Image (spheres, rainbow, N blue to C red):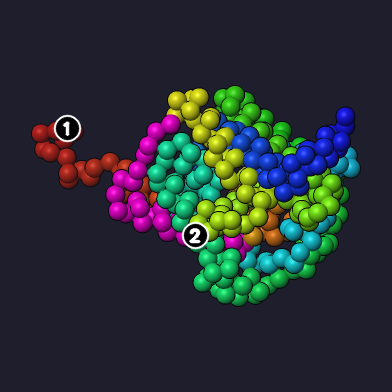
Amino acid sequence: MSPADLLAALMERVGEMWTITLAGLGIGVLFGFFAQKSRFCLRSAVIEFARNTTGGKLTVWLFAFATAVGLTQAFILLGWLDVSTARQLAGRGSISGALIGGAMFGAGMILARGCSSRLLVLAAQGNLRSLLSGLIFAVVATASLGGILSPLRLWLAELWTVEGGASRDLIAITGIGHGGALAFAGVWLAAAIFWARKQRVPFWGWAGGIGVGAMVAIAWLATYAISRQAFDMVIGVQSLSFTGPASDVLMLVLSPPGQPLKFDIGLVPGVFIGSFIAAAFAGELKLEGFQGGPAMRRYIAGAVLMGFGGMLAGGCAVGAGVSGAAVFTLTAWVTLFAMWGAAMFTDWWMDRRHEPAEHAPPAASAVPPSHAPA
């Protein structure tokens, strides 16, 4: 049987809603496993870039990014995937939302010491700081979607909008074509391989990064394939994101039945399960809490900024920064650049500018006379 026949048989057996939900669950498990093993994290990549260090975190992110872009564009060139109906391309977008929301998210992930996907991965291995931050993130995202923060989000989003279709498609705007987009991904993949060899990135660094990127592309492919087979319900073509899904799962838990079964409902628990499995096999399950009031305030502020910013921008570090970038959505790239810029500034403002004073050698006058140099 062909893959299409197997998919049709599965949908006939369990139904369309369960099929798309199980797809989200399975892809989420693999994403969580690879993300935990590779320590995939946009925040860590930004800090490493900004501080000009070579710990391999930026290389892991580049592997994920290049793989997601390359595989997605390869699927399109092979005729296996059509993303023209995806919300990120077909619907009207917001440049102001991407700029402001992306900047808020970037600042928030520095304060919370992880983006939304990283918080979920860390929570699965016992990090209570990340668990609380993730819950606050989901609450604020829900309030921004249709709650008390929704009017502010809509007002900011309407400041500068762009119509869907070609106006939001960077491949159409630049004229590079899908072949050019694939070549672009190849350049960054080659750079990741070069730096991985130079920095001696361990196996799970590059393999996990590639796995993370592959899950983004496979999510695009899976949701498109299921959407073509579905008759009883409209299934959108989408990939991985964590702002909207976090809100959906929160509503499902707090107000069952909440949201209907769909890809996002399977994704979040899948990532948690995959991360837990990876941490358990590696012996990395460990309860960790806050070290004081200031740390808690910092994490809460970061979660609030990410919850509102991610919903305003229409995507998180994965949803916009990798999934949206893989299909060359204009607003996703604006969001990605805004995240990087704001994250670098926040890292400098909150952490780096205090380091010289903290790590400076003692002044000469402070040296006891008996130990002073001759």
State the image quarter where residue 74 is shown: top right
Whether residue 223 is visible to the viewer of this picture, yes or no, is no
Which quarter shows the N terminus? top right
Rendered image: mark on residue 171: none
Residue designated by label 2: 139
Image position of 315 (left or right of 162): left
Q: Does 360 sit above or below residue 142?
A: above
For image coordinates 74% across by 59% down, the residue present is 87
For image coordinates 45% across by 25% down, the residue present is 283
Image position of 304 (left or right of 76): left
Image position of 370 (left or right of 207): left
For image coordinates 47% across by 53% down, the residue present is 135
| 2 and 1 marks in contact (CB < 8 Å) | no
How far across and down, in percent of the image, does residue 44 sit? 51, 42
Residue designated by label 1: 374
Foreground disc of the pair 2, 1: 2
How far across and down, in percent of the image, does residue 209 sit? 63, 34
Whether residue 363 is visible to the viewer of this picture, yes or no, is yes
Q: Which tag, 2 or 1, sits closer to the chain's start?
A: 2
Q: For mark 1, does the 10 Å Cα neighbourhood hold few (<14), some (14 to 19), or many (20 or more) residues?
A: few
Q: For mark 2, does the 10 Å Cα neighbourhood hold few (<14), some (14 to 19), or many (20 or more) residues?
A: many
